[in-house]
Image (tube, rainbow, N blue to C red):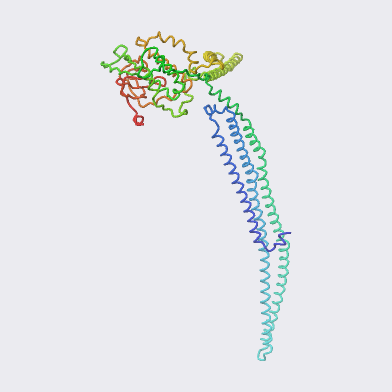
Amino acid sequence: MSWGTELWDQFDNLEKHTQWGIDILEKYIKFVKERTEIEISYAKQLRNLSKKYQPKRNSKEEEEYKYTSCKAFISTLNEMNDYAGQHEVISENMTSQITVELARYVQELKQERKSHFHDGRKAQQHIETCWKQLESSKRRFERDCKEADRAQQYFEKMDADINVTKADVEKARQQAQLRHQMAEDSKADYSSALQKFNHEQREHYCTHIPSIFQKIQEMEERRIVRIGESMKTYAEVDRQVIPIIGKCLDGIAKAAESIDQKNDSQLVIEAYKSGFEPPGDIEFEDYTQPMKRTISETSLSNSRGDSKTELKFASKSKGKLWPFIKKNKLMSLLTSPHQPPPPPPASASPSAVPNGPQSPKQQKEPLSHRFNEFMTSKPKIHCFRSLKRGGAGPEDFSNLPPEQRRKKLQQKVDELNKEIQKEMDQRDAITKMKDVYVKNPQMGDPDSLDHKLIEVGQNIEKLRLEVQKFEAWLTEVEGRLPIRGEQTRRQSGIYEAQTTPSVNNCAQDRESPDGSYTEEQSQENELKMMATDFDDEFDDEEPLPTIGTCKALYTFEGQNEGTISIAEGEILYVIEEDKGDGWTRIRRNEDEEGYVPTSYVEVYLDKNAKDS
């Protein structure tokens, strides 16, 4: 089956068909190209998705990924990253093996098709030229025959007419013979042209056109085979990455199987265990006996026994109510001055007065009033999410529960030991370098490394002192941790009995800053210790925001609890404006804040903060 014999007269249709074949090939190339773009875009989106959910380095989120479920999630993200890489491989292979190769083949195909159809048109033009020559000789032969016939008829007419001279008859006869001769020559030319055309036509339709059409057929069949091979390559490119994608999916499944709920539960215990014992039973208080009756606000007294009873009530209430009372509110109520502020000094320069104006003796109101004030105040914490986590605390982590404090101290000791090891490795490297310089002076001056060795040695010594300090705290904490199975004691009682028994005993013999001891001050100290114990269970609240600034007009030495010393001309931050009692609460830095007389400072409130 050949196009040359079967389609000898379909030159134009074959030209259209081959052009359509090239268009189909270009359409397939465009399809594969768009598929590669989709694969690249999909891989990019997968990588961005994996990167988006990766934990950030050196952040709290990274610490939370110690659980097996979170580790499995990290493994899933990593496998998805590899999964995205396989889609990039698909795109690259399709581009190199299909798109590029087919684009080059299309250019070659277009050139070959152009050459074949050029030869076909040339053959058609040749046969058309032969046909025109045949038609020309045929028309000339026909014309000469007609002229010869007319000349013969004219000669016969002249020869039959008796009135015509012999000369005219002879002339007509010669003309007739001439026309006959011309007709014979035209006949011979026509016959020769006809034979030539028939030969050329046989060659055209039996040799030239079949050969050209056969080449076009072979070209079209190669195109069909090539597009089939490209489709097979298209499938093979996908099939090649299936095993690797399967491994990625197997990795995700294996990560899911590695999740251990028991291990995660144990990690939660290690992360949040406080080390305290559960609270014991609350003793029964018999209100029917006047001697054991709980003191109310109307029957408060400043006697020592009443204060102890009140403190007992506060201790029992701590575990239930104190978690919902902000520390700032508690300490503000305990330490804020409750007396009129001193008037500003009369002298123009307060610094001229020795020691400046003295802070007045506080007329302390009964501590139970303050205690009842913050116990009955509306809590501002709406949920435990508002508690600040991971804030800056003391160096010995004393603000944490015992178990968490032990873990933090152990972690700090390990970090310091690693730093010591790094410094020792650096010292060894510098020592080796110095030995090389001693043996080869041209490489460097060995004395230039002495100051580095001294500096590294000092760093090691400092780090070792730090390690000893934290190890001492660690030993202290490990000695204080309670043992399960001992007699059940109250949570606050265990920790306070190990740290503050002597403080409570000595508090009775201690005098206040103004020379007199007051029972309320002792109660304040004990309540502050309870507040500190509360901090072991809950992290500190965020500090009060600043609402403006102030400039000290006079020097003030705050000697009483809750006040702060200021120097003339000092600029400080205002965190609580005057409530009508003549005192303004200010802050010098994150750790220093207190009350000063409002008349001693010039306040500049921030309008936005005041409006809010």
User: Residue 533 at x, y = what percent?
Assistant: 46, 18
Left of 492 or right of it: where is 202?
right
| Residue 204 x/y as whole percent | 71, 63
> Who is closer to the viewer here, 605 or 524?
524
Where in the figure is residue 106, as x and y percent of width and height? 64, 50
Front position in the image: 612 or 53: 612
> Which residue occupies the foreground of this view, 196 or 407?
407
> Does residue 455 appear anywhere in the picture?
no
**Quarter where residue 594 is shown:** top left
Quadrant location of the N terminus in the rendered image:
bottom right
Residue 479, given in percent of the width and then of the height, sits at 54, 13
Q: Is residue 346 left or right of residue 109?
A: left
Residue positioned most to the bottom: 162
Q: Residue at x 60, y 26 (%)?
A: 263
Where, by quadrant of the figure, is residue 425 drawn? top right
Using the rendered image of the protein, determine whether residue 297 is visible from the camera's viewpoint: yes
Q: Is residue 303 above or below residue 54?
A: above
Q: The C terminus appears in which quarter of the rendering?
A: top left
Position of 566 relative to 74 (above/below): above
Image quadrant assignment for residue 352: top left
